[in-house]
Amino acid sequence: MFITFEGIEGCGKSTQARLLSERMQKEGYSVLFTHEPGDSPIGKHLRKILLSEPMDSLTELLLFLADRREHLVHLIQPALSQHTVVICDRYIYSTLAYQVYGRGIKKYLVDTIHQEILDNTFPDRVYLLDLDVSQALQRKKHHAFDRIEKESYEFHQRVREGFLELAKDNPSARILDATLPPLTIHNLIWEDIQTLFLHRRQI
Ligand SMILES: Nc1ncnc2c1ncn2[C@@H]1O[C@H](COP(=O)(O)OP(=O)(O)OP(=O)(O)O)[C@@H](O)[C@H]1O
Ligand SMILES: [Mg+2]
């Protein structure tokens, strides 16, 4: 089972991914809680470059995709093959929302590279935490902003709309109102996860 969390900066992805991982572990599941970019040996270096150095949009896309490939091959695929539940903070949607909707890169380019590098590893469930851009950035105001968080309001707005557009057309996506309290969101996710697992067992 492969579950991903998506959404703009500060919408609550890490909070919900952590709550779900802890809940599943408590229920006895073996869980890998991971994130992009950065959760692989090479990814750690890529993350540092991606979040600090100014760069061309296509270079940025290729570095994010290199990080994804490393992450997939070294962490996600081995875990899935051991029947470990993988909970990943950001995945495919983030690239499409930020690089295609945010930066204006052609979608076919991202889709084509994804086709080659993902080995058909798509999430069983995508949770999109949807939140107003100002509210999201407000939540992060006590932290130093990284290179991407420093982008304009309009950029983040395009990214938010991109996420919503992507989720609308995908039956495995669930859009959640990220203004709700963290535990309320977690309980909605938990209810959904139970139906998902029940459904899988019946197949
Ligand atoms: N539902 C919520 N309501 C109010 N505040 C929240 C909620 N969920 C998370 N927060 C708070 O908002 C801030 C950002 O949350 P979190 O780090 O989970 O977001 P994120 O989507 O992972 O952000 P980033 O994209 O920067 O990693 C944290 O201070 C967190 O405690
Ligand atoms: Mg986070």
Image (tube, rainbow, N blue to C red):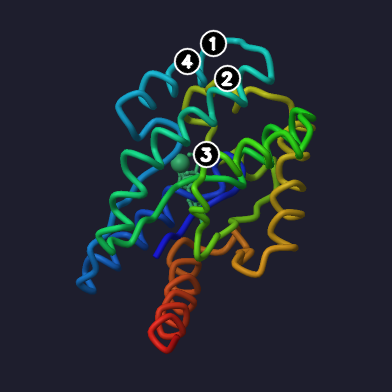
* Amino acid on which disc 2 is placed: Arg
* Amino acid on which disc 4 is placed: Ile
Q: In the drawing, what numbered circle is on residue 117?
A: 3
- What is the secondary structure assignment of the residue under circle 4? helix
Q: CA distance from mark 4 to mark 2?
A: 10 Å
Dot 1: within a 10 Å radius of its alpha carbon, few (fewer than 14), some, or many (20 or more) residues? few
Q: Residue 182 location in percent, x, y?
A: 46, 61
Q: In the drawing, what numbered circle is on residue 49?
A: 4
Q: Nearer the viewer, mark 4 or mark 2?
A: 4
- What is the secondary structure assignment of the residue under circle 1? loop
Tell me if the residue at label 3 has its CB under 8 Å from ligand 1: no
Q: In the drawing, what numbered circle is on residue 12?
A: none
Q: CA distance from mark 3 to mark 1?
A: 25 Å
Q: In the drawing, what numbered circle is on residue 53?
A: 1
* For the residues bearing labels 1 and 2, Cβ distance under 8 angstroms: yes
Which residue is tagged 2? 147
Near-viewer residue (117 or 149): 117
* For the residues bearing labels 4 and 2, Cβ distance under 8 angstroms: no
Q: How many numbered marks, from 0 up? A: 4
Q: CA distance from mark 3 to mark 4?
A: 21 Å
